[in-house]
Image (spheres, rainbow, N blue to C red):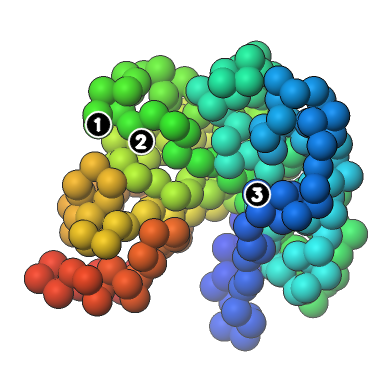
Amino acid sequence: MPNSFLSRLHSPDRPVLVFDGAMGTNLQIQNLTAEDFGGEAYEGCNEYLVKTKPEAVEIVHRSFLEAGADVIETDTFGATSLVLAEYDLADQAYELNKLAAELAKRCAADFSTPDKPRFVAGSIGPTTKLPTLGHIDFDTMKATYREQVEGLIDGGVDLLLVETCQDVLQIKAALNAIEEVFATQGDRLPLMVSVTMETTGTMLVGSDAAAMLTILEPFPIDVLGLNCATGPIGWQITSATSPPIPPL
């Protein structure tokens, strides 16, 4: 059903929709070895586990679904070629994103019922580069995001989540890549963006919430929120001189 996530989200009688928790720490507590990651050269690359030891990722997905999560995120937070290049895996970006999406979708399908459908969010992280600080040019970042988005969509995700964003220019690169893919494929998925605010009341590169909202307003974002760092409560406490975040 197209946009079934948004239908569920906007249903007048819906329960609260609960997302899963941390992927990385829940992989770490499994005490995985270098062999599990495919060798010492890849140890620590959680995104590669969907290929070398998918059952470890499946354990995380299923544990959250068993706990009642409505939405699980793919194991793709660092699955752009920019990040994977640190492990000499840049050429596998599309494949790993597609595999991660397919794995999460299989798990979600096993737990979905008509009364409680389960959804998969394609996790799109901030990479390790900040374009505002000149670490990478905009077009290169956009191209790497487009490759990731294509893999996630081809793998069957229900929505896209651009998360833990620290740089508005990085968000724009991701959103432009997503819109290009949507235009090419002729269809859309629900789109979420989650930014990170520091104790200063700004993003890492200095943009405050008001500026961030103004810059992102033209984009068709379905859900906009905050994650990591101080969170919305901490931000409002430590930023008494900044304007409050308007309701979204």
Farthest residue toward the left? 241
Q: Are marks 2 and 1 in contact (CB under 8 Å)?
A: yes
Numbered circle sitting on residue 132:
1
Q: Is label 2 in a helix, a strand or a loop?
A: helix
Q: Which residue is mark 3?
A: 24
Q: Which residue is mark 2?
A: 170
Q: Nearer the viewer, residue 165 or 200?
A: 200
Which residue type carries mark 1?
Thr
User: x, y percentage for residue 134?
Assistant: 26, 23
Count the marks: how many? Answer: 3
As drawn, 27 above or below 236: above
The quarter in which the N terminus is drawn is: bottom right
User: x, y percentage for residue 135?
Assistant: 32, 23
The residue at the point 27 percent across, 50 percent down is: 203
Q: Nearer the viewer, residue 41 or 135?
A: 41
The residue at the point 65 percent across, 49 percent down is: 24
Which residue type carries mark 3?
Gly
Q: Is label 1 in a helix, a strand or a loop?
A: helix
